[in-house]
Amino acid sequence: MVPTYYHCPRCQSFEVKVHKTNVFCSSCKLTFDKKFLKILEDEDILANEELEGIVDVFTEDKDDTDDLTLIP
C-alpha cells in the first residue's frame, strides 16, 4: 500500500498531525476531515471549526418561529 501524505488545504503546510478521521494543522490550528481531503480540491474544503459555525447558525434559533413571516 502506498502511504498517503496529508497537507493543510488552508496554508499548504505539511506540518500536520494525522488522526484516525481528521488532520490537525499545527500552523493554522484548524482541523480538517480526511474524507473531504480525499475528494475535494483544497479551495473547496472547510475546516471542522468553520463547518460547526455554519451548523450553529441554523440550530441557534430552531425553536424561535415567531420571527418567521409566511407568504400566502
Image: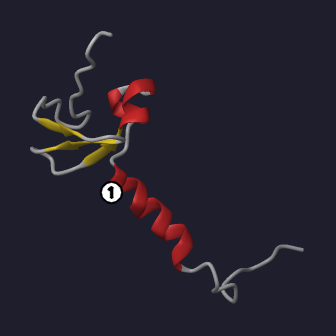
Quadrant of the rendering where the C terminus is positioned:
bottom right
Left or right, residue 62 beside residue 6:
right
Q: Residue furthest bottom?
A: 66
Coordinates of residue 27 in the picture (x, y in percent): 9, 44
- Residue shown at 36% from the left, 30% from the top: 37
Residue 34 appears in which quarter of the rendering?
Answer: top left
Q: How far across and down, in percent of the image, does residue 70 sit?
A: 80, 77
Q: Which quadrant of the view contains residue 5?
A: top left
Q: Is residue 35 left or right of residue 16?
A: right
Closest to the observer: 9 or 21? 21
Figure check: 25 above or below 3: below
The quarter of the displayed image where residue 50 is located: bottom left
**Badge 1: how crowded within 10 Å, few (<14), some, or many (20+)?**
few
**Residue 32 locus on image (x, y percent):** 32, 43
Q: Which residue is mark 1?
A: 49
| Viewer-side residue, 13 vs 67 | 13
Count of numbered circles on the image:
1
User: Taking 35 as reference, is 26 above or below it?
Assistant: below
Q: Is residue 49 or residue 16 the one in the foreground?
A: 16
- Rendered-image quadrant of the N terminus: top left
The residue at the point 56 percent across, 80 percent down is 61
Q: Helix or strand or loop: what does disc 1 sit on?
A: helix
Q: Residue extending furthest top?
A: 2
The residue that appears at 33% across and 29% down in the rendered structure is 42
State the image coordinates of residue 40 (x, y, percent, origin top left).
43, 27
On screen, residue 72 above or below 35: below
12 relative position to 39: left or right? left
Rendering colour mode:
secondary structure
Residue type beneath disc 1: Glu
In percent of the image, x 26 and y 33: which residue is there?
Answer: 9
Outermost residue toward the right in this view: 72
